[in-house]
Image: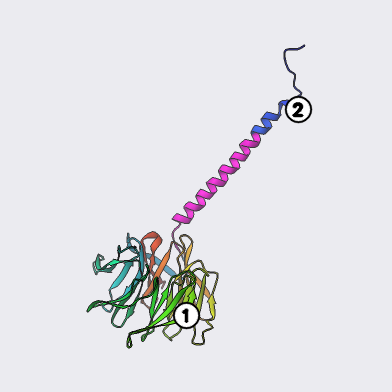
Amino acid sequence: MSLFRTHSPGASTQPGRAGSYWRALLGIVCSIALGALALAAWRHLAPPQAEAGWRYEVYLDDVEKVSALAIDSQGQLLLSQELQNGQGRILQRNADGSLTEVELGLSKPDGMATFRGGVVFSQEQDTEPVRWYGRDGTRTLFSGRNIEGLASDGRFLYAIEDRHGDGHLLRYDPETDTTLVLRSDLDEAEAITACPDGRLYYSEKAKGQVRQLVAEGNDPLVLEGLNQPGYLLCTADGLWITEDATHMARLLLLIAGGRQHTVLSHLRSAQTIVQTAPGRYLLAEQGRNRVLSLQRRD
């Protein structure tokens, strides 16, 4: 009997074939992993892209958790830092570009609007109140639950609660110091805006929708399919919508006739947008801790 086992030619090639198979499979897995890493890096690092006719630049940088913006009666920019548990604050930008603290000890200050000669600001955490800030100091107006967006039509102040399924849209009357619930059972409603002609719009982030607030109560759907709409602003240019998504967020503009423009793309957690002059805006990009200046091209 032979001491050596004989092999057929076909059998001798099987281990090599198996090795090639596993090497090929490993190569495919590595390629997929590298592709996923490259996509994640691109999503994270890709700079914003502006639509034709618009341009942007960095206006303020290194402002941690920048969220709400407002222009006060003196034309100065106020901005909030959306930190929790009394760590939040409101800053004022000075003429030399430096920042001064004007309100401290806040809990998620996440909405601001000009109102009756001053600026009102919300606090999204728990039942923290909406307050008015101006030359006469700071005073409390009213409370709600997780209030975020604020807007004024010149007479009333509107506030919206960012809650899951049981949020309210509120209207505050400063003449009577009373608050009226206009809508209930909203789902992560974050934004409300008043147009120059009196129209009102609000968003529900969880549903990706924007609706018009109408007196009859059956609020028509204006936009849907949005990626976490976070803030609304209505100006002569149209209805602005920011998306509060971590990556690939957009700044949208809905103009007359229902045409939608993507003015900026590749944003990270876009927050408040305010108008500083016709065709000029400031936009808080929280995901990059900065404020962008946006304007129409000549």
**Residue at the spot of label 1:** 183
Residue 247, horizontal then vertical, whole percent = 47, 60
Residue at 54% over, 72% down:
224
**Residue 25 is a magenta residue:** yes
As drawn, 215 above or below 231: below
**Residue at the spot of label 2:** 10
Which residue lies most toward the left here?
136
Asked whether the viewer can see residue 2, the reply is: yes
Distance (Cα) linking label 2 and label 1: 77 Å
- Does residue 238 appear left or right of residue 144 in this picture? right
Q: Between residues 187 and 98, which one lies in front from this camera angle?
A: 187
Residue 1, horizontal then vertical, whole percent = 77, 11
Mark 2 and 1 residues: CB-CB less than 8 Å, in contact?
no
- The chosen color scheme is rainbow
**Of the residues shown, which amino acid type is indicated by label 1?**
Arg
Q: Which residues are magenta?
A: 20-49
- Does residue 37 appear left or right of residue 75 in this picture? right
Asked whether the viewer can see residue 234, the reply is: no
Q: Between residues 233 and 56, which one lies in front from this camera angle?
A: 233
**Of the residues shown, which amino acid type is indicated by label 2?**
Gly
Residue at 63% over, 36% down:
22
* Mark 1 crowd level (few <14, some 14–19, many ≥20, 10 Å Cα): some
